[in-house]
């Protein structure tokens, strides 16, 4: 969705007439290049994505899960300076952050749970396994030390005999 403003902040052209979106663009955003975000409800996002049928289906799923869910829209503001043939223009591009990205947030939240499970369960189990194997190696090391002592005594006796 694209909106074009003049140097005074007056709206010159819009791709589609969506009043809530036009009101959401803050006048101070139009003074510098930058990125901003607009939070809207599912119904407002639905009007913005009215031409995208696959997105509408996904919005229905979101609406079924949580009717009060908020959607985030990215807003990019670019100021183009005046030239000999063109006045200064400010072009605002509003793009919805895809619903799949919201779903990926869910994946990252599950990742945190998996990480926590690893820290709480798997790592202590690995520590116990390592401790157990070291305990066995200490026991065997003690036997090897006594075996070395016995073989050393035997070799000393052999030298005395020969």
Image (cartoon, rainbow, N blue to C red):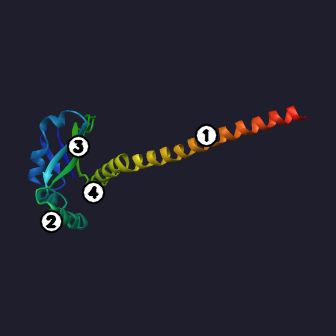
Residue for point 31% across, 48% down: 112
Mark-to-mark CA distance, 1 and 3: 79 Å
- Out of 2 and 50, give the one closest to the viewer: 50
* Residue 139 percent location from the top left of the image: 57, 43
* Residue 31 percent location from the top left of the image: 18, 33
- Within 10 Å of disc 3 (Cα), the crowding (few <14, some 14-19, many 20+) is many
Mark-to-mark CA distance, 3 and 4: 30 Å
Look at mark 2 in the image and give the residue it sits on: 64
The image quarter containing residue 81 is top left
The first of marks 1 and 3 along the sequence is 3
Badge 1 element: helix
Q: Which mark is residue 91?
A: 3
The first of marks 1 and 2 along the sequence is 2
- Out of 103 and 116, give the one closest to the viewer: 116
The image quarter containing residue 30 is top left
The first of marks 2 and 3 along the sequence is 2
Q: Which mark is residue 142?
A: 1
Residue for point 44% across, 45% down: 127
């Amino acid at each position: 969705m694209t909106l074009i403003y003049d140097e005074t902040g007056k709206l010159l052209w819009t791709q589609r007439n969506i009043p809530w979106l036009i009101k959401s663009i803050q006048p101070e955003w139009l003074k510098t290049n930058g990125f901003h975000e607009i939070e809207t409800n599912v119904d407002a996002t639905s009007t913005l994505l009215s031409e995208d049928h696959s997105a509408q289906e996904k919005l229905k799923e979101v609406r079924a899960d949580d009717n009060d869910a908020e959607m985030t829209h990215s807003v990019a503001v670019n100021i183009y300076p005046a030239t000999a043939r063109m006045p200064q223009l400010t072009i605002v591009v509003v793009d919805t952050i895809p619903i799949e990205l919201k779903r990926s947030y869910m994946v990252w939240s599950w990742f945190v749970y998996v990480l926590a499970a690893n820290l709480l369960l798997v790592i202590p189990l690995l520590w116990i396994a390592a401790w157990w194997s070291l305990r066995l190696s200490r026991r065997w090391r003690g036997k090897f030390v006594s075996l070395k002592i016995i073989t050393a005594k035997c070799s000393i006796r052999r030298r005395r005999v020969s």
